Amino acid sequence: MRLIVAITGASGVIYGKRMLEVLRRKNVETHLVISKAGEKVIEHELDASKSDLKKLANYVYDMDDWSAPIVSGSFKTDGMVIIPCSMKTLAGIAHGYSDNIILRAADVTLKEKRKLIIVPRETPLSAIHLRNMLELAEENVTIVPAMPAYYHEPKGIDDLVDFVVGKVLDLLGIKHTLTKGWSNRTPK
Ligand SMILES: Cc1cc2nc3c(=O)[nH]c(=O)nc-3n(C[C@H](O)[C@H](O)[C@H](O)COP(=O)(O)O)c2cc1C
């Protein structure tokens, strides 16, 4: 399996890091782009550096590297995951405004009818954010808000992160043991 993974400048870059860790273990070929704002958020939120994250991917591209293969539809992939996804990147995809290679790769993923999964994070959401999400949902983009549940009895932040990452893996058809399913939940 070959996936494009983008980390943009929304809070929750830990989701992107965890996603890369799991995909590496699963031998998925990853093509990573971290936006400039994403790099800033990594500095704010993670103990790991951007170069630690880049080491988790098979291929890494700069935001303005227009020679990267992922900007072309002829480069075949099994899809793209944007985790976390900022409202700016979400707006750019919704309006076909491909002025960096994350937006272009998402645009390509859509035009080639491949799987695009985004993990947006913002709160509260404005009508503009919601309209942009509706535009994308109508284009078959899968929207997985960074919105963990609590029914799986999380013991800490790692379990909450794994819940969201596990959802994305489920949608990609990648088997994992990050979370117990609802049926395996211990009743109180
Ligand atoms: C520490 C920090 C946290 C941020 N958190 C969010 C967020 O949760 N959601 C969001 O949409 N934007 C957030 N932003 C703003 C985006 O980074 C900004 O809109 C940026 O232009 C996004 O660019 P990108 O989509 O190319 O990464 C945050 C910025 C910083 C510096």
Image (spheres, rainbow, N blue to C red):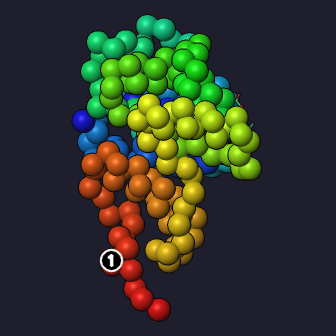
Q: What residue lies at 40% left-to-right and 24% top-to-bottom?
A: 110
Q: What residue lies at 72% left-to-right and 50% top-to-bottom?
A: 123
x and y percent of residue 21 in the render? 41, 47
Q: What residue lies at 63% left-to-right and 36% top-to-bottom?
A: 131
Query: Quick one: which residue is furthest to the top in this view?
Result: 67
Would you place residue 4 above or below residue 65 in this image?
below
Would you place residue 40 above or below residue 23 in this image?
above
Which of 56 and 75 lies nearest the eye of the viewer? 75
Mark 1: few/some/many CA within 10 Å (<14, 14-19, 20+): few
Would you place residue 133 above or below residue 101 in this image?
below
Q: What residue lies at 46% left-to-right and 24% top-to-bottom?
A: 106
Q: Is residue 89 left or right of residue 137?
A: right
Would you place residue 98 above or below residue 155 in this image?
above
Residue bearing the label numbered 1:
183
Which of 127 and 91 lies nearest the eye of the viewer? 127
x and y percent of residue 26 in the render? 28, 47
SS at mark 1 in the image = helix
Q: Is mark 1 within 8 Å of ligand 1?
A: no
Q: Quadrant of ligand 1?
A: top right
x and y percent of residue 113 in the render? 33, 26
x and y percent of residue 54 in the render? 48, 33
Would residue 182 be seen by someone viewing this image from the given angle?
Answer: yes
